[in-house]
Image (cartoon, rainbow, N blue to C red):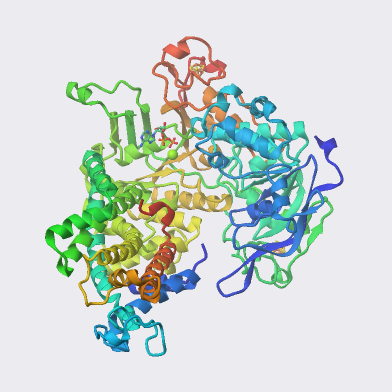
Amino acid sequence: MKDMVTKEPLIQVRDLSVGFTGRAGHTLPVLRNIDLAVRRGESLGLVGESGSGKSTLALAMMGYLKRGLRVIGGGTHFAGLDMFTLSRKELEGIRGGRLALIPQNSGQSLTPTLKIGAQLSEALRLHSKLPEAEHSARVVQLLEQVRLPDPSAIAGRYPHELSGGQQQRAAIAMALAGEPEALLLDEPTTGLDVTTQAHILELLRDLAAETGMAMVYVSHDLGAIARVCDRVVVMYAGEAVLEGPVREVLRNPAHPYARGLLASIPKLTDARLPMALEGRPPPPGKAGDGCAFVDRCAIATDVCRTSRPALATVPSGARVRCHHADRADSLPTRSPADADPRVIAEDAILSLGDLSISYARPGFLDQILGRKPATTPTVDGITIELEKGETLGLVGESGSGKSTILKAVAGLLPPAGGRIELAGDGVLPPLVDTRRPDQLRRVQLIFQNPDESLNPRQTIAEILAQPLKLYFGLSGEALRQRIEDLLESVRLGAHYMDRLPSQLSGGEKQRVAVARAFAAEPDLVLCDEVTSALDVSVQAAVLDLLDQLRRSRNTAYVFVSHDLAVVRALSDRVAVLYQGRLCEIGPAAAVYAAPSHPYTEVLLGAVLEPDPDTVPTLSAADIVELSPPARGCPFQRRCPRKIGPQCDTETPPWQDDGHGHAIRCHIPREAL
Amino acid sequence: MAVASTNARPSVASRFLGVIADITSRPSGAIGLALVTFHLFLAIFGPWLAPYDYKAVDANLMMQAPSGAHWFGTDHLGRDTFSRTLLGGREAILVTGIATPIAVLWGGFVGIFFGLVGGRLDDVLMRVVDAFLSLPWILKMLVLIVTFGTGIEVLIPTLAFFYGIPVIRIARAATHDVVARDFIQAARARGHGRMTIIQRELLPNVRDALLVEGAMRWSWMLLAFSSLSFLGFGVSPPTPDWGLMIADARGFMSFAPWGVLAPVIGLSSLIIGINLTADALAKALGIDRAQKAPV
Ligand SMILES: Nc1ncnc2c1ncn2[C@@H]1O[C@H](COP(=O)(O)OP(=O)(O)O)[C@@H](O)[C@H]1O
Ligand code: SF4
Ligand code: SF4
Ligand SMILES: [Mg+2]
C-alpha cells in the first residue's frame, strides 16, 4: 500500500477558512486556515470532538458547504480542479464518481423503497461507463467486494431487511460503483456494535489496499483512526492543531490538546479511570487572538494568550500549532496515579433471582389457561447479587437485553418470572404503580441521552425539584438550597438553575441527569449507556463524577455499556450478556483476562485500541441474531469454538473458579 | 448549544417575547406577523378609517372604475369598494377568532386523552376520525347549516366542531411522541402520579404543537368561512364580507375586475400572513412542521 502513495497530492486544501454570519452580523469562522494534502493511495484521518469542524472540512473537500456556510479564504483542489469554482454540472460529474462520500448513518441514507440491486444499478448508470447489459453482473461483483454473503440474494432485498453492518457495506458498495479515486468517510462506524465496527474497518483497509484509492476518514474515535489511517490531523475549534504519521500522533503527540484527548480515552488494558479534560472548546468567533486551547492548557504561558501559534514542523516530522510543542511531552497521556481502593461491604443491596422478561404478551387463550407464552423470553435466567457500594458492569452488543433488565429493575417493565429483591425491602412488586415511594426512591435510573431524558420545557431547577418534592416534600428556601447543593455536587454552579436544557452542552445536561438521580439519595443507581452520547473528553469527566459520587455516598451502580473499555474503568465486577442470557460474570480483572467465555473473547478481540499496532481479532461471523435460540447455548449460532451438538441442545453449565468468576460453557474451564 | 443568557428566568412573558423576537428575526415571519397585525388593526379600527358608509347605495355611482374619490371603484349598487374591503374581514375574523380556540381546545383535549389511553379504544376512535376527515368538508358543513340555519350562533359552533377533528389527530400524534420519550419514563420510574406527569411533563410539550396547529387551523377556517359566505351561507347582506363581495362582483369580472380583485387581495393577504407566521412560529418553537402537517 505504501509504495502506491504518490508525491502529487490528489486532494489539496490550501489556507481554507469557512464561516457563517452570526446574528450580530459578524463573520464567525468554523474552519480556520486549514492546510493539508492527501496523496493517492494514502489514508488520512480527521479527529476531534463534536463541533471541531471535521465534517465541514471533509464536505468542503467535495466542494460542498452546508447552508449558511461560505468560504472566507483559501480553497480546495481535487486532482488539480479548484472545487469552489467548478460549475454545478462539473461538480455533479465528480461527486459520487471520482470522489465519493460515505456519510454518517449511511445505512439510513439508502433509499428505503428501492432494492439494493436497483440502487447499485442506478449508481452505475450515473457514475460508470459500463454498458447497461453488464450492470447486474457488476452489482454482484460490488457486493462481493464488500464481503457481503450471498450477493445475489442481498441485491434483491430492501435496505430495512439488512442489519446495520450490512447496510453500511451496501453503502460502501454504492460508493465504489464509480470506481472513486478518493473516498470521504464521515463517522462510518459510529453507532455500530464493536464487532460490526471492527469488521467494517478491516474491509476498508483491504479496499484501500486493493484499489489504491485515497481515503479521508472522519471520526471522533481514535481507535478506528488507528486501524485505517496512515496520517492523522487533529482538529480543535476549527483549526488543525496537529498533523503527523498515525504512530507519532497516537503514541507521543506533540500538542497539549492531543495529549489530553488521548488521556481521556478509557483503555481496555487499564483498569483506572481516564483523565478528564476539563472545560470546553470556544464557540465560533470566541477563540480570541491567542491559542484556541489556552483556557484548557496546563502549560499555557502569556504568549499563548496574545499570539496565535502557527503550524510549525517539529523535529519528529509532525506539524504542530503550539508555542511550546517542545514542552508538550511533560503532559501525561494516561492517568498518572491509581485511585484509592474502595471498600465494598459483603452485604447485598440488590439480588436478582432467575429473572426473565418477555416482550411477547401471552395470547388470550394462554392467559385463561395460565400458560406462559410459547416464544422464548427476551431475557432469561438472570441471577445476580450486587453488594452495597459495588459497581456491576453489564456488557453485550445492542439488543442483548441490557436496557431491558434495567427497566425491569426500575419497575417499568413487568418481569415474566423470577424476583427482584432490594435489601431491607424484600421482594419488590413488579411495577412502579405497586411499589411504595421509599422503594422507588432507593432505585434511580439514568438514561443514555440527556436530550431525551430531560424535559425540554422545564428549567434545571424544576427538573431537580421533582424528586425533592416527591420524596422529601421540600419546598421554599430548603428546596432551593438543596438544588444548589446538588448542582454543586455535579460541579455545576447555582447559576444553572434557571436555564433550560437546550442552553446546556451535552456533558452539562448529563450532569443534571446525574444530579436528578442523586437527589433521591438512592442506594442503587442504574446507568444505561450514560456516556455513549458524549465526546470522549466529556465522557471522562462524567465517569470521574460518577466515581466521586459513589465514593462519597456508597451508592451501588449497575453500569450498562457496549463499550468494554468504559465498563472496565468503572466496574468492580462485570457480567457479559448475549441474547438476554448471562455468559460470564466475575471480578472485572478476571473477566478481562483468560480464561474467557468464547463470546467475551470475541468482544474483547474486536475492541479497537488507540494504537496502530494492536490488531483486532475477528473470530465470530458478523451477523445479527433477532431472537435467542430455544435450547442450548445462546451463543451457539455464532460461536467460533463450538464443540458439538451439546451446544445446540444442552444448557451449558456454570463453571466457577471459587472466587466468584463463573463462565457458562461446555468447554472445560481449563481449555478456555 | 451556545448559552444565550445566564440569568434568563424563562417566565411565560419572557418566553412569549423570545418567541416573538425569533419570529420577527426571519424575513418571512416578520412579513407574516406584520400582515396579521395589520388585518387585526383594520378589523378593530376599520369603522373609523373607512372613508364612506359601507351600505350607502348610490345609483349614480354604479360600477365606477378606481379613481381619486373611490380608490377601488364602486360595486353594482354604487357602494365604495375600498370601504367595504376595509371592513370585509371583520365578520370572518370575529367568527374564526372565536371558533379556532374552541376547536383547538376540544380537539386537543380529546386527542391527548386518546393518545394517553392508547390501545383498542384509540384505534377505533382514529378510524372514526379518518372516516370523518375523508368526507368533503363543504358537504359536512352544508348539512349542518341547512339543518340549523346560518348566523354567527350556528357558524361558530359548526366551524369549531369540524375544525377540532383534525386537531385530534395532531394532539394524539404529539402525545404519542412525547409519551415515548425518556423523561416521561424517568417520571414514571420516580413514581409520580398520572396527573402530575400529564401536567408537568406532557402538556408543556404538546402545547407547542397545538399552538402551531391552531394557527394553521385559523387560516383553513377563514377560507371555509369565506367560501360559505360566497355560497350565501355566511354573512347576510348588506354586511360587507370578502366572500360575499367576491360572489357579488363575480358577474362583472370582465368589465369591473377591481370588484373581485380587492376582496381577493384582502382575504389572501391575511391567509398568507397567517401561514407565514405559523411557519415561523413552528421554527421558533422547534417543531418540525413537515412531520406535523395535517394530511
Ligand atoms: N418495546 C419492545 N418491544 C419488543 N421488543 C423489544 C422492545 N424493546 C426491546 N426489544 C427487544 O428486546 C431485545 C433486548 O433489547 P434491549 O434491552 O434494548 O437491549 P440493549 O439495551 O442491550 O441494547 C432486543 O431484541 C430488542 O429488539
Ligand atoms: S500554544 Fe500555548 S495554550 Fe496553546 S496549546 Fe500550546 S502551550 Fe497550550
Ligand atoms: S457452549 Fe458451545 S456454543 Fe456455547 S460458547 Fe461454549 S462452545 Fe460456544
Ligand atoms: Mg440499550
Residue B197 x %, y % = 27, 54
Q: Is A412 drawn above or below residue B29 in the view shown?
A: above
Q: Residue at x 71, y 63 (%)?
A: A17
Q: Residue at x 24, y 26 (%)?
A: A363
Residue A612 x %, y % = 71, 38
Q: Is residue B215 left or right of residue A425?
A: right
Q: Residue at x 57, y 61 (%)?
A: A279
For this rendering, which residue is in front, A42 or B98? B98
The quadrant the N terminus of chain A occupies is: top right
Q: Is A283 drawn above or below residue A262 in the view shown?
A: below
Where residue A377 sits, quadrant-wise, is top left
Where residue A495 sits, quadrant-wise, is bottom left
For this rendering, which residue is in front, B233 or B259? B259
For this rendering, which residue is in front, A112 or A640? A112
Where residue B101 sits, quadrant-wise, is bottom left
Q: Is residue A222 left or right of residue B82?
A: right
- Total number of numbered labels? 0
The quadrant the C terminus of chain A occupies is: top right
Viewer can see residue B124: yes
Q: Residue furthest top?
A: A645
Q: Residue at x 38, y 62 (%)?
A: A460
User: Where in the image, quadrant-wise, is ligand 2 located?
Assistant: bottom right
Viewer can see residue A336: no
Residue A74 x %, y % = 76, 62
Residue B289 x %, y % = 41, 57
Q: Is A582 drawn above or below residue A495 in the view shown?
A: above
Q: Is residue A413 left or right of residue A233?
A: left
Q: Residue furthest right?
A: A7
For this rendering, which residue is in front, A401 or B117? B117
